[in-house]
Image (spheres, rainbow, N blue to C red):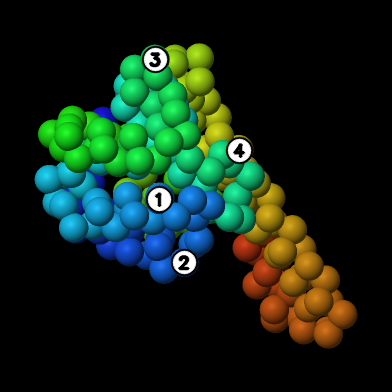
Amino acid sequence: MLATVPVDTKKEFVRWFLQHHKLKRRECVWILNYLLSHETLLANVHFTDEAHYCPRSMVMSTTKSEGIPFRFYKGNLMTADAEKAFHDLRLHDKEKMYIQLNFPNNHISPEYASVREENPFLPSYLQVSEADRKLAHRLVEESMENLNREQLRKSIDEALDQNDKERFLELSALLKDLQIPQS
């Protein structure tokens, strides 16, 4: 992991999460509240995706998500018993714990993004390569440029419809600038 998320940021996120989401299992609420009151534990908690690949992790889901209600993974063991997970959390407070939270639109939540960390245990075939990142970035840029050109064309049409010669010339010049390849 490149950077560690500060405990205060994690606390703020957990409070926000508990206020805005209802979990499928009440024991998950207890676990998250317990983390709020134990900074040593929270310092060793890492929010991530695909937590089942981690050596010690929990997956929790809200009532509005499709995810499993609760799972605890430790080594090769997996259980849906939240009390065992809580017990393990208390006994091994210095060990890293990875938590995956399943809730609607978690991938676009700025709150979750503030605490989400890359999963260091994710198999390489599931990781996004640098080439794929660059390609995705280029596609987003091209899409934004196309959208801007289309909006400009609509505005030019509106200027023509309204016989607004000054606006038409201004927007046409902007469109021409966008269509000239930048070197």
| Mark pair 3, 4: CA separation | 40 Å
Q: Is mark 4 on a helix, strand or loop?
A: helix
Q: Name the residue: 70% across, 81% down.
A: 166
Please give the label number shown on residue 139: 4
Locate residue 104, reporting x and y percent.
58, 53
Depth check, mark 3 against mark 4: the one in front is 3
Q: Residue 75 at x, y = what percent?
A: 34, 17
| Residue on which disc 2 sits | 20
Residue drawn where x is 68% and y is 69% of the image: 171
Residue occupied by mark 1: 27
Q: For residue 158, what is the image quadrant? A: bottom right
* Residue 5 in the image, given as x and y percentages of width and height: 23, 46
* Horizontal side, residue 153 vs residue 36: left or right: right
Which of label 4 and label 2 is nearer to you?
2
Label 1 Cα neighbours within 10 Å, binned few <14 / some 14-19 / many ≥20: some
Where is residue 120 drawn, in percent x and y? 33, 24
Query: Which label sits in the foreground, 4 or 1?
Result: 1
Viewer-nearest residue: 128 or 167:
128
Q: How far apart are marks 3 and 1 (CA)?
A: 23 Å
Give the SS element for disc 1. Answer: helix
What distance separates the C-alpha of mark 3 from that of mark 2? 33 Å
Residue type at mark 3 is Asn
**Above/below status of 71 relative to 65:** above
For the point 60% across and 50% down, which residue is it? 65
The residue carrying mark 3 is: 76
**Front position in the image: 36 or 142:** 36
Say what secondary structure mark 3 lies in.
loop
Is 65 located above or below residue 92 in the figure?
A: below
Tag count = 4
Q: Nearer the viewer, residue 140 or 95?
A: 95
